[in-house]
Image (tube, rainbow, N blue to C red):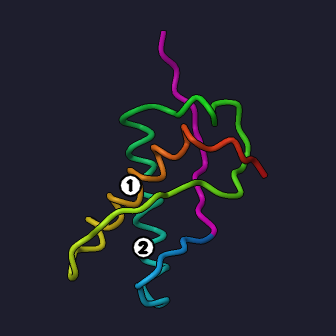
Amino acid sequence: MKTERDIELAIDKIVLHGFAPKDSKGLKEAVEFELGRLIKERGLPEVIKSGGNFEHLPGGNFSIKTGSSLKTLASKISNQVYNGFGESKTRK
């Protein structure tokens, strides 16, 4: 029997180089949405199943074309963060 549970996903800050600070709020919300979608689709990563906060998740490096949409950028960031759950051992 599969049960669902509610989780709360909140991103305090996204640090990106080469982007205007005014874009950060919309981007943060888009990443929260997309990351929530990934978790629902792929499952909750093992490292966070027991709960807790993370001070830092490695996002790695990625390239994106100039003028890409917010959705495209959020998707790239979310995938990097989701994959970073497996690499992170740092909890707050």
Image x and y of residue 77, in percent: 40, 60
Residue at x 21% of width, y 74% of height: 65
Residue at x 26% of width, y 70% of height: 64
Image x and y of residue 62, in percent: 35, 62
Q: Can you name the residue that lies furthest to the top here?
A: 1
Q: Nearer the viewer, residue 44 or 77?
A: 77
What amino acid type is highlighted by mark number 2? Leu
Q: Quadrant of residue 49?
A: top right
Q: Is residue 25 above or below residue 76?
A: below
Q: How many marks?
A: 2
In screen coordinates, is 75 left or right of 2?
A: left
Image x and y of residue 81, in percent: 48, 52
Q: Nearer the viewer, residue 48 or 7?
A: 48
What amino acid type is highlighted by mark number 1? Glu
Q: Is residue 84 above or below residue 20?
A: above
Dominant SS type (magenta) = loop
Image x and y of residue 8, in percent: 61, 49
Residue at x 42% of width, y 73% of height: 27
Q: In the image, which residues are magenta?
A: 1-12
In screen coordinates, is 87 left or right of 55?
A: left
Bin the neighbour count of mark 1 within 10 Å (Cα to Cα): few under 14, some 14-19, many 20 and up.
Answer: some
**Label number found at residue 34:** 1
**Label number found at residue 27:** 2
Q: Can you name the residue that lies furthest to the right here?
A: 92
Secondary structure type for disc 1: helix
